[in-house]
Image (tube, coloured by chain):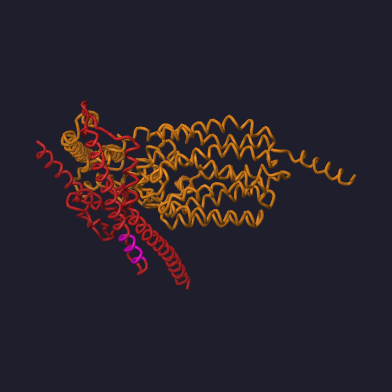
Chain colours: A red, B orange
Amino acid sequence: MRRGFGALGDLGRRLIFRSVSLRGTESPNYGRARASTRGPDQREPSAEISDFRPPVDSHFDWVGPPDRFSNLRCVKFYIPKNESKLEQQLRKLRIDTQNWNQKFWSNQNIIFNKEKEEFIHLRLKAKGLGLRDEEGRKNILTAEEMAEFYKKFLNTNYKKHVNYNKEWYRRNFTITWLMGRTVLQNAWRRLRQRKEIKQ
Amino acid sequence: MYRVSCRRLPGRLGLCVFEPLHKIAIIKQILKVFVHHYRSGNGEWLQIRHFYLPKCQYVTKVDKGLYQRAKPKAEPSSAPFPEKSPLINDVVVRSVQQVPTITPYPSSLHEDEEQIPGKAGMEEVADDKGTSQDNRKGKQWNEVKVQLADLPGIYAKLSKIKLTALVATTATAGFAMAPVPFDLSCLLLATLGTGLASCAANSINQFFEVPFDSNMNRTKNRPLVRGQISPLHAVSFAAACGVPGIAILALGINPLTGALGAFNLFLYTCCYTPMKRLSILNTWVGSVVGAIPPVMGWTAATGSIGAGALLLGGILYSWQFPHFNALSWNLREDYSRGGYRMMSVTHPALCKRVAFRHCFGLIGLSTLCSVFDVTTWTFPLISLPINLYISYLGYRFYRDSSRNSARKLFFCSLWHLPMLLLLMLTCKKSIAGSESTIHHQVQTEMQV
């Protein structure tokens, strides 16, 4: 039954989405910021986000919903027709930073949750309790017991966080600096064009 | 109707049933479009462009308000669609919003909510809770195109307007407590300058912390996190607030106040913000940041740092600990995952001790206010009830270290500070009294 509906759904989806590709909106204006570092079981969410195609006549970036693992928002960057070298450098840096952030945070969150689960299992085992009580509800630890895990996690990952911090600050500053230069360059270009038109 | 029935079905089974039903819903709408078009129009049969409409409605955003609507294309006037499109849009928008989120990682990522029942309490003071409209927009693809009408809201969130208002209030209190004749224009300039400097500091703080804020529930709706504005825009806003703010303080009032403002801005953005991820000492630095505004208010009025300025600063410094330690107690998981080094996570015993200690510090400092003639002797007496109450809550927090006691202490701190400042203002030692004392002293000296 599910397969039948699935086929119908696919047909519907193809009818809706393929019609857009007939117009050729696939990738002329938008660079794909695909998170290439996902594992096989995580391909589905990344495919959902990357499949998004901003409309052809939009000249702006598009920001997506938060990612399920990293909680960061994917950005589809707009590529203008006469993109300068500086703009290209900025866009590439932003895409690279996005991927790097995505990798770090999805990794961080997944490891955190995995280690948290393991900690809870071990503690419950030590107490002689199973994962669920007689009524089927999950057994949980108190905030004090969980605090031991949070402290351990912070301390074991200290160096990693410090390195991430340094790199993040460096990238953030560079991106903002390049953005500033791009804005000035564009303003200068427009001014020159106006002068040429007047002449 | 599908939503109601399918929420009753557990997990994946519900999904298996719901998803195909939802697909049928979309197809039904498409069929309605076909039928209507064929019946109503000028007999034109289906063209490719008629298939575009539903797709464009998913992703295009024209109206800055609620709905996703197809952008008005350059269609021939005979096209029958436009009158009907609002209905289609509404229907399709509704079905877009009904799509359930598939969770491939079912257990841990959502367990937080089960295990932390008290979190909702802290969420009340989340700085950007957002309306349901906002939340819906936040879960969709949005164009990074700043609408002028959205800017005030965005700037308010960027500058953490409520916190800025509190900071400006403490500066005003510092000004008002100074033993000099009241000067309204100076007061307004001091408040404005401090407020602008605070806006700048908060914007830079958010600029630095985008990925960390994304991962914490309390801060995930901030403008930079949501991509509503670019980092350059945020920095420009900060510069546009900070430069005039410090200039007003330095040139409009006096250089000392300007220097304090600039120092505070630097301390917050370049010391406190990075230190949050390096060492627990960030809390002490942050408390100094909170203590400086009333000192600025005092120096704006008198031109120098007196005992009163230091006492007021001391009161604000002590207040920060019960306030922040209680807040951070219930956010330990978020801080740990985000890599923030806070006392509540790494040194919980110290966290409780410090919060409790500083509640008593408030009582001591209130007494010292009268010793140094900042206030009359009535102030320590009338402030004793609220100081004792916060100390009692601090003691409960120290003893119980429960989520509930932390929450109570935090909420108490929110009304305790304005109340204390108000009482202080009412007990201010009047200038007339001190002038007559000086006059009397001079007379006795002359007689001698």
Q: Which contiguous range is marked in magenta?
A: A87-96
Residue A54 screen position, x and y as percent: 29, 53
Q: Residue furthest bottom?
A: A199
Give yes or no for residue A89 being in the magenta stretch.
Answer: yes
Is residue B13 or residue B107 the one in the foreground? B107
Tell me the chief SS of the magenta region: helix
- The x and y percentages for residue B428 are 69, 38
Q: Indicate whether residue B427 is drawn in magenta.
A: no
* Residue B40 position by quadrant: top left
Residue A154 at x, y percent in the picture = 34, 49
Residue at point 37%, 42% (across, down): B332
Q: Residue at x 26, y 61 (%)?
A: A28
Q: Is residue B190 above or below residue B17?
A: below
Q: Position of residue A183 (x, y in %)?
A: 43, 63
Side of A5 relative to A38 (left or right): left
* Total marks placed: 0
Q: Nearer the viewer, residue B305 or B181?
A: B305
Q: Is residue B257 left or right of residue A166?
A: right
Q: Quadrant of the N terminus of chain B?
A: top left
